[in-house]
Image: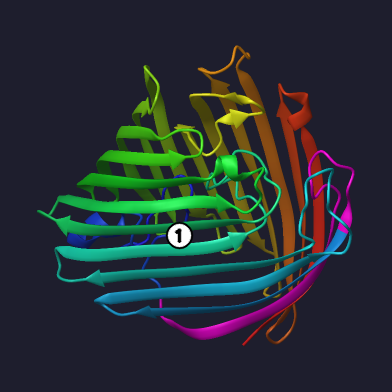
């Protein structure tokens, strides 16, 4: 049962059974054929003109990695596994003033998803991920802006889905996730959260499901802890076998430990995934909310970081051997309501764009390359930066 929020997108299949589509249209269940265990090994060389924002450092770097993936699908149970271990080495010194940055960094990721359909009415789902990374992922909100150094990100999402009638179903579950930075200067953005949720789902037609969602999120940060209630209504519609759109909107009620004020703000999320034709696939997302991953700017701490995230990406298959990819992420932040400082509110915006290619040059052997651009604009001039990265590498699968 694959869950799509504003931050995770995947093509979904159509079920011909009305009773099943109450679940299948939900973004928690992607019917995919089983695939055996396969391995990937790769290496690349790259150039980064701003690996430590605020400095004049620029350097070449190298990456090596090995990965494995496995998918088992049966009428009752789906098991999906993917893992990757890598190593990144910057060839030049990255230290900046008193800031010490490792030139070599191990990386890794692990994903394990389980779905068990107990009966026609009842299904259990567990989605789990663990990653040790050195670059931000702007779509998932692990950081408001780029941090220097590596971090660990984890998430476990466990739910029970039950179909009460031919049209009414629910998902009830909990999420535990968080981010932990290695760099002491970035640890002020450490965060962990426990989220409890319940989704009511009512099938309006074989292609459309109306949703009503309640979430409670208890977020722990180094700045202060917050309690958040989300009440959202929306819908999910399948335009075709390869096109799904999801929209939810509502209100976020928020209280902060140690604060005498409570806050109410809008909350919304949307996602679209579509295969336009045999060559072109497109994904897009958007999210509006008040986040906790970064509420400190310099010495000032703000109660609210009102955040909007937008992104779109696409893949175009030029031929059997060549595919192209590109995308853009936009992030807008408004830091407001500082209880500890007379500093004015701070606005920031970030653009992240990328392009890449993948070319099969022999059986099970591929050449790939990418270019990535970031630009941060801020009311605090010292936080502004731009960055260019490019790489080229080879990858083998077996």
Residue 299 versus residue 214: which sits nearer the camera?
A: 299
- The answer to if 274 sits in the magenta stretch is no
| Residue range corresponding to the magenta coloring | 33-59
Residue 100 versus residue 319: which sits nearer the camera?
A: 100
Q: Is residue 268 above or below residue 258?
A: below
Residue 16 visible, this orientation: no
Q: Secondary structure at mark 1?
A: loop
Q: Name the residue at 52% across, 48% down.
A: 140
What colour scheme was applied to this rendering of the protein? rainbow
Q: Position of residue 210 (x, y in %)?
A: 25, 41
Q: Which quadrant: the N terminus?
A: bottom left
Mark 1 nearby-residue class (10 Å; few <14, some 14–19, many ≥20): many
Q: Is residue 256 above or below residue 212?
A: above
| Lateral position of residue 166 relative to residue 95, left or right | left
Residue 215 versus residue 397: which sits nearer the camera?
A: 215
Disc 1 designates what residue?
Answer: 11
Q: Position of residue 368 (x, y in %)?
A: 75, 69
Q: Name the residue at 56% across, 36% down.
A: 294
| Lateral position of residue 295 relative to residue 93, left or right | left
| Lateral position of residue 55 relative to residue 354, left or right | right
Picture mark count? 1
Return the residue found at the far left: 165
Name the quadrant containing residue 158.
Answer: bottom left
- The answer to if 53 sits in the magenta stretch is yes
Q: Is residue 224 above or below residue 67?
A: above
């Amino acid at each position: 049962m694959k869950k799509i929020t504003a931050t995770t997108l995947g093509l979904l299949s159509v079920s011909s059974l009305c009773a099943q589509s109450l679940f299948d249209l939900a973004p928690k269940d992607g019917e995919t054929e089983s695939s055996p265990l396969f391995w990937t090994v790769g290496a690349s060389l790259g150039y980064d003109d701003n690996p430590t924002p605020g400095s004049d450092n620029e350097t070449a770097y190298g990456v090596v990695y090995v990965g494995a993936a496995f998918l088992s699908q049966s009428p009752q149970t789906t098991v999906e596994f993917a893992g990757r271990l890598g190593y990144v080495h910057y060839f030049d010194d990255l230290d900046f003033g008193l800031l010490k940055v490792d030139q070599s960094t191990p990386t890794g990721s692990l994903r394990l998803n389980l779905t068990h359909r107990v009966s026609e009415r009842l299904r259990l789902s567990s989605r789990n991920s663990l990653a040790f990374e050195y670059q931000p992922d702007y779509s998932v909100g692990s950081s408001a802006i780029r941090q220097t150094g590596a971090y660990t990100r984890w998430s476990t999402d466990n739910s029970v889905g039950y179909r009460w009638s031919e049209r009414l179903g629910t998902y009830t579950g909990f999420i535990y996730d968080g981010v932990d930075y290695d760099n002491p200067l970035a640890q002020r953005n450490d965060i962990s959260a426990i989220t409890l949720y319940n989704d009511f789902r009512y099938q309006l037609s074989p292609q459309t499901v109306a949703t009503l969602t309640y979430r409670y999120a208890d977020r722990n940060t180094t700045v202060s802890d917050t309690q958040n209630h989300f009440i959202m209504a929306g819908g999910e519609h399948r335009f075709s076998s390869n096109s799904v759109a999801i929209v939810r909107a509502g209100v976020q009620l928020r209280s902060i430990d140690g604060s005498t004020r409570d806050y109410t703000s809008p909350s919304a999320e949307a996602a679209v995934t579509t295969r336009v034709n045999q060559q072109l696939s497109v994904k897009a997302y958007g999210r509006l909310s008040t986040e906790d991953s970064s509420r400190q700017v310099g010495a000032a701490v703000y109660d609210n970081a009102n955040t909007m995230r937008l992104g779109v990406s696409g893949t175009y298959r030029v031929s059997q051997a060549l595919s192209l990819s590109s995308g853009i992420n936009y992030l807008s932040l408004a830091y407001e309501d500082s209880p500890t400082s007379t500093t004015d509110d701070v606005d920031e915006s970030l653009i992240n764009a990328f392009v890449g290619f993948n070319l099969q040059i022999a059986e099970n052997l591929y050449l790939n390359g990418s270019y990535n651009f970031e630009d941060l604009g801020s009311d605090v001039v010292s936080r502004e930066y731009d960055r260019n990265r490019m790489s080229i590498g080879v990858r083998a699968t077996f």
